[in-house]
Amino acid sequence: MPHPIRGPSSSLGQRCAAVPPPPPWAPPLFFFSDLDYPQRMLSYQHAYHAGNLADFQKHALLAWMLAYLTDKPKPMTYIETHAGRGLYDLGGDEARKTGEAEAGISRALTEGWLPETHPLRQVLASVRREYGPDAYPGSPLIAETLLRPDDVIHLAELHPAEADALADAAPFAHLHREDGFAMANALCPPMPRRGLLLIDPSFEVKADYDRIPRFIGQIARKWNVGVIALWYPLLADARHGPMLKALQVAFPEALRHEVQFPPARPGHGMVGSGMFVVNPPFGIDEETRRLDAIFAGL
Ligand SMILES: C[S@@+](CC[C@H](N)C(=O)[O-])C[C@H]1O[C@@H](n2cnc3c(N)ncnc32)[C@H](O)[C@@H]1O
């Protein structure tokens, strides 16, 4: 029987059209009252932004780190607090409305920013072989593509329709329809012990900026061998500043990698993006230098 929301089959169009219209496509940089969190309606939808320059930085580093971790013959755990729907349609209304993917992954492929051997290119090729030339893998699908049968994946997604789509896109993962911070706190330290946690909030809630340093501190105490990666926007009003300062005081050895790029639209508040990585894998500097050279040329 066809699923009432997802529809009868698993074609890319149906998988990616799982979210009811009409979502606002404003950037995720405004705040709801923190009092009703997380019961409030989630309004951010990554389909408008998938494959943009911020995703390019995040997904290139994530794919590189997962390829590094899966190169060793020991099982690992991947945990993601804010997963999204996992598979995006760059030919869909949302992506075409903003044109962000056009300036991001589409341009990257046309201009050959990454070599074909790069793990993100390899994941993209594999996903497009399966779902067609407009498919774009979100971070959960990057993980599902690179991880091996003995590895374990835990994904949290609060938005019901995004979570439904994610269940289709990442069928081998453990899907948690709950607050990602609570999920990660309950799971850590995970088994297998080696692994990576990705924290990729939409920053819809102002409290996210305050809670993230505390949250990463708690996780790092419980899971001192885990790679803990946070994505964050660089905002014209520097709202991310205090969070970064607190993280750098707590984790002076961590990797802080930031790239700047032209705003997606005139007046758009996001002028770049960053990744803060506690326990970064050996050799990641080579990858960050590659990204620095790409973004310097924009
Ligand atoms: C930036 S998107 C994720 C994109 C994804 N990480 C990727 O790179 O493909 C953030 C997602 O987090 C979800 N979300 C927001 N607050 C959440 C929470 N407290 N726990 C779990 N998911 C949440 C939103 O519904 C949204 O789908």
Image: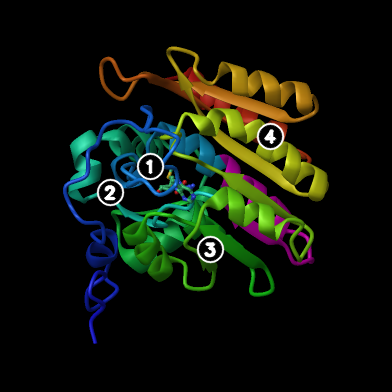
- Residue 158, above or below 273: below
Dot placed on the residue nearer the N-terminal end, 2 or 3: 2
Dot placed on the residue nearer the N-terminal end, 1 or 3: 1
What is the spatial separation of the Cα atoms under label 4 and label 2, in whole angstroms? 36 Å
Q: Amino acid at mark 2?
A: Leu
Few, some or many C-alpha atoms within 10 Å of disc 3 (few <14, some 14-19, many ≥20)? some
Indicate if the residue with disc 2 has its beta carbon within 8 Å of ligand 1. Answer: no
Q: Secondary structure at mark 2?
A: loop
Provide the residue designation for mark 4.
Answer: 214
What is the spatial separation of the Cα atoms under label 2 and label 3, in whole angstroms? 19 Å
Report the magenta residues as a range.
61-80
Q: Amino acid at mark 1?
A: Gly
Provide the residue designation for mark 3.
Answer: 145
Q: Is residue 117 visible?
A: no
* Disc marking residue 90: 2
Q: Secondary structure at mark 4?
A: helix
In this rendering, would 278 be left or right of 52?
right
